[in-house]
Image (spheres, rainbow, N blue to C red):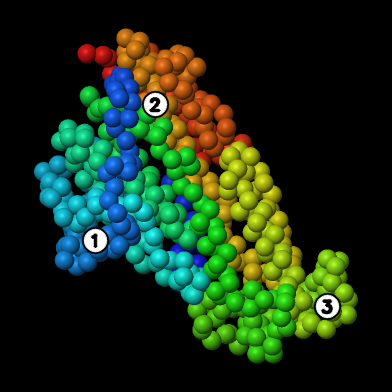
Amino acid sequence: MRHGLTCLAVLLVAALAAPAQAPGQMEPIKLTLSPAAAPSPALKYVLLPELSDQTPGNAALEYYRTFAPDWGWGNIRQPKTWESITQALQVPFKDFPRNEMAWIEKLRMLQHVDLAARREYVDWGMGERLRQEGYGLLLHDVQSLRNIATLLAVRARLEIAQGRYDKAVHTLQTGLALARHTGDAVTLIQEVVGIAIAQVMFNQLEELIQQPGAPNFYWALTDLPHPFFDLRKALQGEKLGLYAAIPELRTLGTTRLTQEQQQKLLPALGGDLEAMVDGGKPKRNSHLIGTLLVLRAYPEAKQALIAEGRKPDEVEALPVLQVVLIHSWRQYQRLQDDEFKCASLPYWEARPLLAQTEERIVQARRRLEGMPFLLEFLPACQKVIAAVVRTDRRIAALRCIEAIRIYAAAHEGKLPATLEAITEVPVPIDPMTGKAFIYHAAGARATLIAPPPPGEQAYVGNSLHYELTLRPPK
């Protein structure tokens, strides 16, 4: 079994992809709202710390300081204490145990997290470690960042329950800055954790906008970065990881593999990835399987290199293993780039291209093209890109909801008949489909739906379904 970064990434991406409910059984998110005009000035409330609130320094150092034992982590992680914290986050808001959770607002650890979230930049120092350790890189501290987000979410709930909305906004700023800082890294695993943290904080924003007298956050949501998470750095980090595991790839096309290098690589070709990534001893049959795969792939690889312009005698002079590896590495790079190039496209344009690439990867594995062990290192890019877009979709949906509250405040507490009827502010489209959200209104109730992409069944990972109830104006 693989350890470290590779294993964690596979597990977390799988968790993101798994529906919390079976297709067709989605429970709508029910929100009860009051009409609320946009604040004046428009950005009276913001959901990320502004430059004027920031102080010099690296946020990562401050976050790491919160893990020190003196900050009380040992007590907080006691099973009974942590169970009460997670329950306070999960219970319906009307049942929130405000008295039992009052201690959390005095937690000095979170005061330090507030400071960390307002540093000028973040640098986790993972680049050089990734170059050296590759897919064996361990990221135990990432789970601690998720724990911090849980504490922040409970504090936000407490502040909302107490009617201290300005304090709650401050906590939301901290939590969303933590999400962005976590995702500003050279590994997809941290990107995925950042996405999870953001979802937890947007859950609390949904609680806040339901409170009587809650301000309107349309412009605060509009002011958030788009996309909220940038995959560029993490995708480049994915390229570094494999070079660390197999440094021979860097000079594969320009130098000749030694006999020692070939003996080292054969176990990985036989499927013993653990030996390659973690430096363990290869299994007894790994060399044999690797040798058979090389002999099977050599004729196709040889013809491919000649077709690319290499002289036949040069190709024949190379070790058989090297010819196969050069061909397989180029296949890998083409498939990797075919995934990565889609990250900057609108999702409705990227999705069919990603699906085509995923199918090519599946077929290549089935046919054992080249060296199949390399294909195992390709990240589940389609799932991660979809997770990033789901965050932007949720922000857009909440902007629609706040636009509805603005309309109601200007029209005697009535819901708009259609989204097109809202002229007070621009109504965003669904960034996952590139089309308008589906909206229906009847009396004081309305539904706002973001459907799944074409051809997919609806579940919580690819759809949004809000049921909105408007309180009558006072």
Q: Distance between the residues labelled 1 and 2?
A: 36 Å
Most distant residue in the top direction: 412
Closer to the observer: label 3 or label 2? 3
- Relative side of 229 to 151, left or right: right
Q: Which residue is tagged 1?
A: 66
Going from N to C along the chain, the mark reached first, 1 or 3, is 1
Q: In this view, does 268 lie above or below 12?
A: below
Q: What residue type is labelled 1?
A: Thr
Q: Which residue is tagged 2?
A: 401
Pick the residue in front: 2 or 391: 391
Tell me what residue is drawn at x 71 percent, y 56 percent: 360
Q: Distance between the residues labelled 1 and 3?
A: 57 Å
The reply to whether residue 298 is visible in this rendering is yes
Where residue 69 sits in the image (x, y, percent)? 19, 67
Question: Circle 1 sits in a helix, a strand or a loop, which is it?
Answer: loop
CA neighbours of label 1 inside 10 A, class few (<14), some (14 to 19), many (20+):
many
Quadrant including the C terminus: top left
Image quadrant in which you'd find residue 67: bottom left
